[in-house]
Amino acid sequence: MNTILHITSRDRWETAKNTGTYRSDSLLTEGFIHCSTLAQVIGSANRFFQQQIDLVILMIDVDRVTSEIKYEGADPQNLFPHIYGTLNIDAVTQSIDIETDSDGLFVMPKELIS
């Protein structure tokens, strides 16, 4: 399975499950939903979600996403997946809690360590 990851609040994910689609704030402001690869997700969490609690990582099967996905970024060696449209929730294969260590930094969930 080809998987990308997205970080969101537990509340926003619960709302999406009830409506059938997920929208992030960035979809309205930037035109896409920010995602990460497995290698990028903890760096993204620590850069953009500091001090936030009750977050989950959505595991997304790219083959099930109905909106367009583009890999973009300033560094061609580190492109981020972006979903250009809403995310259909049936593309989400799992949601995983993301926790912090004693220093307040996010750590890779056990479920994502191979």
Image (spheres, rainbow, N blue to C red):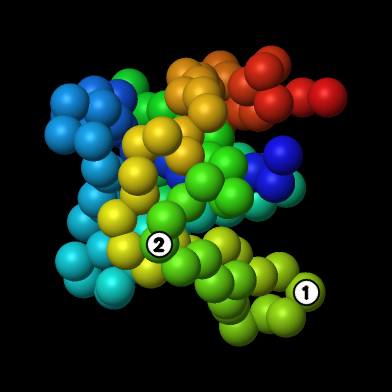
User: Measured from the top left, where is residue 16 in percent x and y?
Assistant: 23, 34
Residue placed at 57% from the left, 76% from the top? 72
Left or right, 39 with respect to 16, comes to right
Task: Give the number of marks.
Answer: 2
Query: Which residue occupies the extreme right position in the image?
Result: 114
Circle 1 sits in a helix, a strand or a loop, which is it?
A: loop
Left or right, 78 with respect to 105, comes to right
* Classed neighbour count for the residue bearing mark 1: other residues with Cα under 10 Å, few (<14), some (14–19), many (≥20): few
The residue that label 2 is drawn on is: 67
Task: Give the answer, above or below, for where 40 lies relative to 105.
Answer: below
State which quarter of the image contains the C terminus.
top right
Residue 35 circle label: none
Task: Give the answer, above or below, for where 113 lies relative to 79.
Answer: above
The residue that label 1 is drawn on is: 77
Residue placed at 72% from the left, 39% from the top? 1
Q: Which of 2 and 113 is in front in this view?
A: 2
User: Measured from the top left, where is residue 82 in percent x and y?
Assistant: 48, 65
- Residue 100 visible: yes
- Residue 45 visible: no
Residue placed at 25% from the left, 42% from the top? 21
